[in-house]
Image: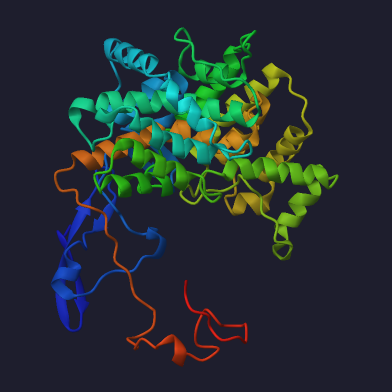
Amino acid sequence: MNNSAKLELDGRIYELPLVVGTEGERAVDISQLRQQSGWITLDEGYGNTGSCRSNITFIDGEKGILRYRGVPIEELAEASTFIETAFLIIYGQLPTQRELRRFSELLTRSENIHEDMKYHFEGFPSNAHPMAILSSMINAASCFYPELMRGYDPATFEAQAARLISQVRTIAAFAYRKSRGMPIIYPKPSFKYTANFLHMMFSDPYEDYDLKPEVVRALDLIFLLHADHEQNCSTATVRFIASSQANLFASAAAGVCALWGPLHGGANQAVIEMLDHIRSTGDDGSRFIQEVKDKKSGKRLMGFGHRVYKHYDPRAKIIKRKCDELLNALKVEDPLLDIAKRLEETALRDPYFVERRLYPNVDFYSGIIMRAIGIPVEMFTVVFAIGRMPGWIANYREISMGSASRIYRPRQIYTGSNQRPYVPISERGSDGGSASRGTGQPAQPAR
């Protein structure tokens, strides 16, 4: 195999180095192209651009492969826990018993937020979205610990990471309780990570929430399956912010904001909203399926298909089994879940969906599980953020430790006006200035 690719521009040939990853992924290194030729590449949305070299997560969308640090997601889902997997993702190897115990103890010591932070929750209106509160409070959390406000520092990173992973669930639960006008429930050191989150969400001051093992395990699995997913929108955002040497909390808060978008973290919420819409029309899902097949209807089947996976989402196979087990164990009777099962069964056998590879994805099943547990729709993306925190932290650490890392600064192709003179406001026509456009009145002086 050649070590370079040749690109001809304006009659001149440029040699561009080739880069091959450990799993055989191939790339053309164009980092010196502009310096050598004056040209740049254009790839809107970065769909065909490798923004970094990373050794955290590998995805093969064609084959339906997902591995964290080389370990298949199927093996982790079967034998691991979210916290053990978080350690693997952040530090690169599965922990020993001693390392896992120390990591868990750090999480326990960090689970309580600073008492003064409670007053910040009072500043949000009761109808504030939990994701807005989460991003704001993650940023605020670092202010109470000045040593954590600095950029990457190996001496404080372990404490930073533990505090962030531990407190994100406390902040999330507090935000939920406030939105419902319920008293805050503090974490219990005797509970493990996911059980503690459910406790803070659903317990009462006079009675603890009944922590059913199948519910705890199902939610822990959701966290684990979402722990990292290569260079998606929110992870790329975290790396982007980290490249400026911002601190971990600021970078993670930016990740929350990116995840909030309905095209990213809101997919499982869209599933429940779709099911609710189907039920409100008196349909059991049969009519909706036919409408989806009609391109003129504009109807979309939410929770099916995936931008990366061209075959079955490997996480969906795992979580489907857990979803079936949980619904059977809880004996949940919910018309929306009945509709979901009908959509799933139809899509898995209908040639229209099979030929287009529109299989149910992880968002479809995670939304169903969270609804069965009793987590409200507005908290779905928050749960996603809790699960994705180890991946964000690992990517922050990776870019901060990189000796060749530099601040992210994409280029652009400018398509605006050519050079033109400034026109005094008194000389602008009624349709030439934005202040007067469409009003028919003279422009008013700026104030």
* Residue drawn at the location 48% of the way across and 36% of the way down: 134
Foreground residue, 286 or 151?
151
Left or right position of 16 against 324: left
* Residue drawn at the location 34% of the way across and 42% of the way down: 251
Q: Where is residue 261 in the image (x, y as percent from the top left)?
A: 52, 49
Left or right position of 380 against 289: left
Q: Where is residue 224 in the image (x, y as percent from the top left)?
A: 45, 28
Left or right position of 224 against 201: left
Foreground residue, 279 or 122?
122
Above or below residue 205? Residue 298 is below
Q: The N terminus lies in which quarter of the figure? A: bottom left
Above or below residue 206? Residue 144 is below
Tell me which corner region of the image, top left, top right, bottom left or bottom right, holds residue 427: bottom left
Q: Position of residue 305 (x, y in %)?
A: 56, 48
Asked whether residue 399 appears in the rendered view, the answer is yes
* Residue drawn at the location 74% of the way across and 23% of the way down: 332
Foreground residue, 220 or 251?
251
Q: Position of residue 168 (x, y in %)?
A: 44, 28
Tell me which corner region of the image, top left, top right, bottom left or bottom right, holds residue 367: top right
* Residue drawn at the location 22% of the way across and 50% of the way down: 20
